Amino acid sequence: MKKTLLAVAIPTLLLANSAMAAEIIKTEDGTVDFYGQLRTEVKKLDDKDVTLNAGSSRTGVDARYKLTDTTDVFGKVEFGLNYKADGSDYSMNNRLHYIGIDSEFGKISFGRQWTVSDDVYGADYSYFFGGTALRYSTLSGARHDSLIKYNFDGEDFWVAANYGLSEDDSNQELAELYVGTSVGSFNLHAGGGQNRDKSHKIGTETVTPEPTLPEFTQEKAITADIENIYFEGTVEYTVGAALIGFTYYNAELSDKNSNLSIDENGYSLAGTYSWADNATAYAGYEYTEQSADGVEDQDGTLIYVGSDYNVNSWFRVYAEYGYGDGTTLGYSNKGSDSFIGTTEVDSESSFALGARVYW
């Protein structure tokens, strides 16, 4: 199933994520693996001091057991390391928690999971700065606490879909469907979804109880009922040691209590080149435009270039340069807990270095 583009672009990622997993239990009926990765990253954004933090380190337990000759039950729980921007506090958080059944009719899983749109992703091969033109995660942050996900791998095609339970509006509404195939040296996929947050935070206001008691003044969240409808198409072409990918995304963010809406078009062009058996260089260009009635149109451009170097199956280093100009609404970096809110930059350059240790 050729969904995760990063796995296609950087083959050693699969080795690094699996080769060093520690088997807790291994029997004829199933296995339980303990896995993880420690990350450290150094960043220098254009107008900020150099930062050193833990990136999105994580660890977890992955289990799979046979029910019958053709059916397995599986589950995963994964924890990540959160940190404040100033590095003053670190805390553990639950990243994933789900259980499922895998059979000849497909795989279905239930629980806290990444969305299908994030699994499928698009033409972004960066570690740090890319993803601005992939317009699916503006509301969801690419994850849902009560997600039902289905995957089917055929001989010549794959299908992936999910539905997020709203649970009396305590969660966001979410539904997605994507399909893909491979033809010769081409990988193609297309799909989209609908995501609605009836209590999306758009700002804060200062509230003072009556009678006026300044000492009890507090900030109150301003919320709105926001819906994001999106669809995309991606094509990749592999030739020798190189891969080229292009993704087009269209999304419409709308306020369900008014006629206000924002139409977005995102274009991602990126490529990779394996300059050694254990190293891959990559680069990308992303352009996003937003338009709304009564408001001047805005756009954002991002260019990145970088490379990784896999010292062995359990240790890698990587470096990346990014250039940004214009305005971009919120987006999520794939595979991390980092969600970037609405950002406006003026011809800014950023640099980052990273290292990972896997087990």
Image (cartoon, rainbow, N blue to C red):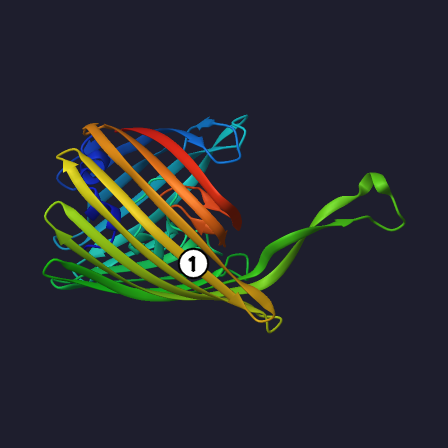
Residue 73 percent location from the top left of the image: 24, 49
Residue 205 percent location from the top left of the image: 72, 51
Q: Nearer the viewer, residue 65 or 343?
A: 343
Q: Which of 178 and 183 is in front in this view?
A: 183
Given the current orientation, which residue lies at the most extreme front position?
A: 347
Quarter of the image for the N terminus: give it.
bottom left
Tell me the crowding category of disc 1: few under 14, some 14 to 19, or many 20 or more residues within 10 angstroms, Cα based: many
Disc 1, SS: strand
Residue 339 percent location from the top left of the image: 46, 46
Instruction: Say whether residue 1 is left or right of residue 355.
Output: left
Q: Which of 270 and 115 is in front in this view?
A: 270
In the image, what residue occupies the spot 43% across and 58% down?
288
Tell me the residue that label 1 is attached to. 288
How many numbered tags mark residues here? 1
In the image, what residue occupies the spot 33% across and 56% down?
268
Quarter of the image for the C terminus: give it.
top left
In the image, what residue occupies the spot 53% across and 49% down?
344
Instruction: Say whether residue 245 is left or right of residue 48.
Output: left
Any part of residue 191 in sight: yes
Residue 94, picture quadrant: top left
Any part of residue 23 in sight: no
Instruction: Say whether residue 164 is left or right of residue 167.
Output: left
Given the current orientation, which residue lies at the most extreme right position?
A: 211
